[in-house]
């Protein structure tokens, strides 16, 4: 099969589309023919070696932690999934490839009406947004400050929180303030003198903070909130340790399938906005990663292998 791979950490120029052996599903695994693989910041962070803990790359590796596809083969012990079924969720091997392995418990059926590009982009974003809101335990009428409310995770977290009756104040760049307002939040532009603007937007105070940007706004957020209780970052382990704020690592984990089941109908019938900002082939994976890192995309970027 064709797969996007790299043999050394670096920029997108170290990426290659290589011909490698198609993996065989082992016990409790299925092989998926990948129809769409969402691009996430963790992909370019992995490429740059930022999540390697300083260790060199031991062997060539691939990218992609989201998937939608068609079951091609099932391994021993798999029940409830058969070849031909359409599914989405988190794979267990890199999904910027023609095929990927996955465990059935990390997959949900893809609704027939849901676009492949959307289905293949949901797992990490929806699982993370859902799981972090569970940790922050917001009640109706409370105020949640979301840093990066215009991003993929931030915009889903904003919509889930608003739907639960939470008041959301959300930061964004100047081009996306209106987009954040449409999601139901009070938008605040990030940048200099942020604390002042946050105090104005949340005059009654902030009950919880969710940092989905990792660009240092959490310092102003903690200043405005007055303490680090019910404050979480998913985006900067450095800010987490500097400020003694919990870092939420690892997407939605076991909650991902529950999160997908709750969220997919909302996206399908238009109650939740989940825009796709760009679709790329395997050979364009570098362009997609560059856009994710530097482009402030107005929605998810997706790799479509076919
Ligand atoms: N720990 C986990 O489980 C987990 C899971 C998923 C994601 N993450 C992390 O969460 C972060 C967001 O992921 P995502 O998929 O939502 O990414 P994304 O869609 O690229 O969103 C990035 C967000 O950061 C904002 N931003 C960009 N440059 C900024 C700047 N200079 N100052 C302030 N804000 C800025 C963007 O705002 P504008 O576009 O309006 O400029 C946008 O709201 C990433 O660091 C990712 O690795 C962690």
Image (tube, helix red, strand yellow):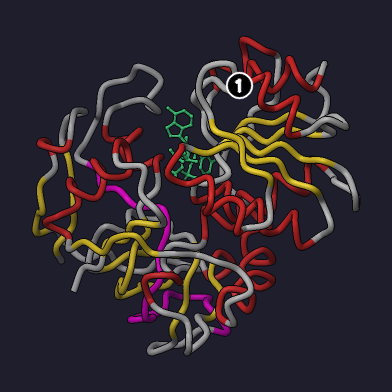
> Residue 40 at what x, y percent from top left?
40, 47
How crowded is the residue under tag 1: few (<14 C-alpha within 10 Å), some, or many (20+)? some
Q: Nearer the viewer, residue 43 or 294?
A: 294
Residue 243 falls in image quadrant:
top right
> Residue 27 at what x, y percent from top left?
47, 67
Give SS at disc 1: helix
The answer to whether 141 is drawn above or below residue 51 in the figure is below
Q: Quadrant of the N terminus?
A: bottom left
For image coordinates 32% across by 61% down, the residue present is 302
Q: Magenta stretch?
A: 61-80
Q: Nearer the viewer, residue 216 or 197?
A: 197
Q: Describe residue 179's horizontal placement relative to residue 62 as left or right.
A: right
Q: Quadrant of the C terminus?
A: bottom left
For image coordinates 29% across by 36% down, the residue present is 294
Tell whether position 69 is magenta.
yes
The residue wearing badge 1 is 194
> Residue 98 at what x, y percent from top left?
22, 68
For image coordinates 63% across by 16% down, the residue present is 219
The answer to whether 74 is drawn above or below residue 25 in the figure is below
For image coordinates 26% across by 64% down, the residue present is 279
Tell whether position 294 is magenta.
no
Residue 147 falls in image quadrant:
top right
């Amino acid at each position: 099969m064709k797969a996007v791979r790299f043999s050394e950490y670096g920029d997108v120029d170290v990426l290659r589309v290589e011909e490698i052996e198609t993996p065989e599903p082992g016990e409790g695994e299925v092989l998926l023919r990948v129809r769409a693989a969402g691009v996430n910041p963790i992909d370019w962070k992995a490429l740059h070696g930022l999540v390697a803990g300083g260790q060199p790359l031991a062997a060539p590796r691939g990218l992609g932690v989201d998937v939608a596809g068609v079951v091609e083969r099932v391994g021993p012990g798999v029940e409830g999934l058969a070849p031909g079924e359409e599914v989405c969720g988190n794979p267990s091997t890199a999904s910027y490839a023609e095929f990927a392995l996955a465990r059935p418990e990390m997959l949900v059926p893809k609704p027939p009406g849901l676009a492949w590009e959307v289905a293949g982009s949901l797992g990490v974003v929806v699982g993370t947004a859902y799981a972090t809101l569970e940790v922050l335990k917001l009640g109706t009428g409370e105020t949640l400050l979301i840093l990066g409310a215009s991003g993929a995770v931030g915009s889903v977290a904003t919509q889930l929180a608003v739907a639960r009756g939470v008041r959301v104040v959300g930061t964004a760049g100047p081009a996306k303030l209106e987009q954040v307002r449409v999601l139901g939040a009070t938008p605040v532009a990030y940048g200099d003198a942020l604390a002042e603007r946050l105090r104005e937007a949340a005059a009654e105070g902030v009950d919880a903070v969710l940092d989905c940007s990792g660009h240092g706004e959490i310092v102003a957020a903690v200043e405005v909130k007055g303490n680090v209780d019910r404050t979480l970052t998913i985006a900067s382990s450095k800010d987490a340790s500097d400020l003694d704020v919990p870092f939420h690592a690892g997407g939605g984990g076991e909650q991902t399938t529950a999160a997908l089941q709750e969220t997919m109908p909302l996206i399908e019938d238009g109650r939740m906005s989940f825009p796709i900002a760009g679709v790329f082939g395997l050979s364009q994976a570098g362009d997609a990663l560059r856009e994710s890192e530097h482009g402030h995309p107005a929605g998810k970027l997706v790799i479509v292998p076919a």
